DNA sequence: CGGTATCCACACCGATACTG
DNA sequence: CAGTATCGGTGTGGATACCG
């Protein structure tokens, strides 16, 4: 693999593809997307599934995803109100790379945790030598 | 796809797989990993390629990745000093899902930007109606 | 039910300066 | 060259309370 295989834009600080990586890294966004992979979910259900996000933060997340065209928000005119969030076609297409990443994570997290322990232990020993 | 297809752990706030998603979302980490996909790179080169990160932040990023066992740091005993960073086997295995995500990003970013413009425009119009 | 509004704490990132 | 040290702004997430 040559350096030129890396698109120039990804190294550009203004590169728009960075927005994707930021979305993925967003604390709740990728979680929401994966939950919505099962079909429409309403606000309160989403809150429960994603284990008690504050409404403000969940709203922020949903608005951002809606703005990006990854999800849709549909208000049903009824009492009590009901609002469903659903993946768009583009949102669904994101599901696949996201799932791959999740699978990678699931299979490597134990190793990563071991690596961290080893690293931290080595650091502790180094500190013991010269305090 | 059923709800049960989602692993319980990803919904758990203490789930370690979230650390992966955070790493990906980290402003520099995923970039560094992709740059290192071409082989070992030294500190200063990395700084240049990733378009002027401050040394502090780059160091933080590299330490975190090293701690996770995704990259190795090798110091060559010479003057001037030379330090190479390189992907571990695990780091390389992350390259593939990361690349998929990047491809997804590259092909969908234009649509996302359009969606944002449309959304913002709609918001502006709504504001004009009731100020 | 599905949000807003406010306030606050803190992690994160950058600028700058200095060191082995 | 490859960092470390210190300081500071800022944006992001959380707690709490209130509204249509």
Image (spheres, coloured by chain):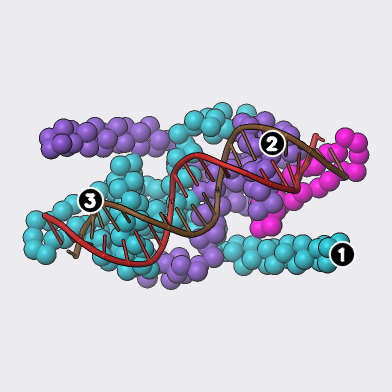
Chain colours: A cyan, B purple, C brown, D red
Q: Element at badge 3?
A: strand
Distance (Cα) linking label 1 and label 3: 58 Å
Residue A61 can be seen, yes or no: yes
Q: Element at badge 2?
A: helix
Q: Element at badge 1?
A: helix
Which image quarter: residue A43? bottom left
In the drawing, what numbered circle is on residue A129?
A: 1
Indicate the position of residue A125 as horizontal and vertical percent values.
81, 66
Q: Which chain carries label 3?
A: A
Distance (Cα) linking label 1 and label 2: 31 Å
Query: In the depicted view, which residue is nearer to us: A98 or B79?
Result: B79
Foreground: disc 1 or disc 2: 1
Residue for point 40% across, 35% down: B109
Foreground: disc 1 or disc 3: 1
Along the polypeptide, which appears first: circle 1 or circle 3? 3
Indicate the position of residue B91 as horizontal and vertical percent values.
65, 51
Q: Give the range drawn in magenta.
A: B65-89
Q: Name the residue under label 2.
A: B46
Q: Name the residue under label 3.
A: A73
Magenta stretch: includes residue B76: yes
In the drawing, what numbered circle is on residue B129?
A: none
Which image quarter: residue B127? top left
Residue for point 68% across, 35% down: B47
Distance (Cα) linking label 2 and label 3: 42 Å
């Amino acid at each position: 693999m040559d350096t030129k295989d890396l698109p120039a834009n990804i190294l550009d600080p203004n590169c728009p593809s960075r927005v994707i990586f930021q979305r993925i890294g967003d604390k709740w966004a990728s979680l929401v997307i994966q939950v919505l992979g099962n079909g429409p979910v309403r606000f309160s259900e989403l809150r429960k599934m994603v284990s008690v996000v504050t409404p403000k933060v969940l709203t922020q997340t949903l608005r951002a995803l809606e703005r990006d065209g990854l999800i849709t928000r549909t208000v049903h005119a009824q009492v009590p109100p009901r609002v469903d969030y659903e993946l768009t076609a583009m949102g669904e297409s994101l599901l696949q790379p996201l799932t791959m990443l999740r699978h990678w994570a699931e299979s490597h997290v134990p190793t990563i945790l071991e690596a961290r322990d080893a690293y931290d232990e080595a650091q502790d020993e180094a500190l013991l030598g010269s305090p």
